[in-house]
Amino acid sequence: MSATIAQASAAAPSATAPAAAGVEVRLDAIRHRYGDAFAVEDVDLRIGPGELVALLGPSGCGKTTLLRIVAGLLRQTEGTVHIGDDVVDALPPNERGAGIVFQSYALFPHMTVEANVAYGLRARGAPQAECERTVGAMLEMVRMSGFRGRYPRELSGGQQQRVALARTLAVRPRVLLLDEPFAALDKNLRLDMQIEIRRIQRELGVTSVLVTHDQEEAMSMADRIAVMNTGRVEQFDTPEAVYDTPQTLFVATFVGTANLLSGRLVQRDGGWSLEAESGGRLALSHAAPCSREGPAVLAARPEHLAIGAPGPDALPATVGMALPLGPSLVYELALGDGRPVKVTMPRTADGPRLAAGDRVGVALRPGSPAAVFSR
C-alpha cells in the first residue's frame, strides 16, 4: 500500500478527538478531464450530515473518479469540494479527514490485526494508552476482538473487511468513503457486511459515500442515491423515488427491471393514456416526467402491471410462460407486435394460473407509478 493511500485511509483531524460525525459534504460544479474526455462533468451534490449516499452506475461512469476527488487522491480539473465548513481542494489526503475502505482492503500483510488498526493513530503520534483504548473499542465494534494477534493472511475476506473498517474508523474520520467494499465477498457474506457497516455508520453518525455498481446494494443501504451515467448525475434522490419515479430513461432501465412500451402520449377525458404501437392503450393516472402529447416511451415495473381480460384500456397480449419465484409468479407475455413484457403477480394457493397461449389484457395497477419519456 502506498504512503499516500495509507495516509488517506488513516486521515483524521486528531487522533484523540471525538468522532467529528455529521459534517456536510458539498461538491460544486466538479469536472475532471482525462485528455480530451470528461470522466466527471458538472457534478453538484450536497450530502447531508450523517447521511449515507451511494454513487451508483455502470463501469466507467465516473463514480470512482468522484470518490478519489473527495478523498484527495485526485485533483479535479474544475470545481470545489467542501467537507464541513472547509474548502479542501488544496489539502493533501491525510489532512482532509476522509477515511477510505478499499475494495482490496489494503491491509499491511506484515502487521497483526491490532497493529493494522493502530497504524493511523500511531502515524499521528497518539499516546500508547490512547492507541490501546481506541483499538480495543474499534475491534469490539466490528466484532473482531478475538483476532487482534492474527495476520491478514489468517483471516477470511469478511474478517479482513472488518479490520479495514476498524482501521479507518479508529482515526475518527469526518467522512467515510467506501470504494466497492463488498465486491470480493460472496452473496451471503456480502449481505451480512452490508448490514454490519450500515449499523456502525448509523451508530457513529458519520457522513458516508459508497461507490457501487450493484443496484440492490445501493437501494438497501443508502439514504439517497446519485445515479451516474457517462460522468453526469442523472438523478439524486431517495431509493424509493429513484425506483418509482425515475427522471430519465437511463435511470428507469438501469435501476430495477422496466418494461419499455413505445407509443403516443395523448390527453383524453381529463386524463392521459398511451396509445401503444403494439396495439391497445394504457390509461395513466398522470404523465411524468414528460407531460406533452406526442411520441413517448413508458417505463413500467413488472409489479406495476396487472393481467386481466382484454379491454379498451389494456394492451392485448398472449401468455408465453410462467416462472415461479418464491412468493411471486413472473409471467412473460408477448404483445401484439411480438415484443415481450414481464408481469409479476403474487403466487397464492387459490390464485388463477394462466397457461401458455392464453389471450389476456395488460393494464397498469390502480395508483401504480409509471414513468413517461418523450422520444
Image (cartoon, helix red, strand yellow):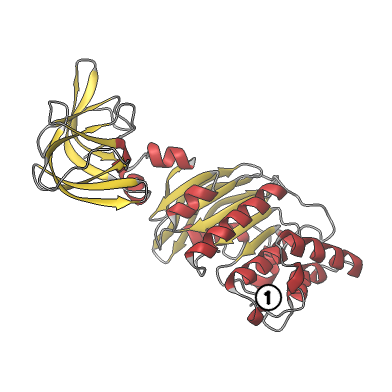
Where is the N terminus found, in terms of image quarters?
bottom right
Q: Is residue 22 left or right of residue 327?
A: right
As drawn, is 1 to the left or to the right of 339?
A: right
Viewer-closest of 300 and 317 = 317
Measured from the top left, where is residue 361 in percent x and y?
15, 34
Q: Position of residue 313 (x, y in %)?
A: 16, 27
Quarter of the image where the C terminus is located: top left
What residue occupies the far front of the structure in this picture?
A: 350
Residue 10, visible in the rendered structure: no
**Quadrant location of residue 39?**
bottom left
Between 204 and 122, the one nearer to me in the picture: 204
Closest to the observer: 329 or 219? 329
Side of 16 where 113 appears, left or right: left
In this rendering, the answer to whether 304 lies above or below 104 is above
Indicate whether 234 appears above or below 92: above
Count up the numbered dots.
1
Residue on which the image places disc 1: 3
For mark 1, does the 10 Å Cα neighbourhood hold few (<14), some (14 to 19), or many (20 or more) residues? few
Q: Residue at x 77, y 52 (%)?
A: 19
Say if residue 142 shows up in the picture.
Answer: yes
**Amino acid at circle 1:** Ala
Residue 81, image x, y percentages: 60, 51
| Residue at 13% from the left image edge and 48% from the top image edge | 356
Q: Residue furthest bottom?
A: 110
* Image quadrant assignment for residue 3: bottom right
The location of residue 211, given as percent across then percent down, is: 52, 58
Say which element carries label 1.
helix
- The answer to whether residue 355 is left or right of residue 90 is left
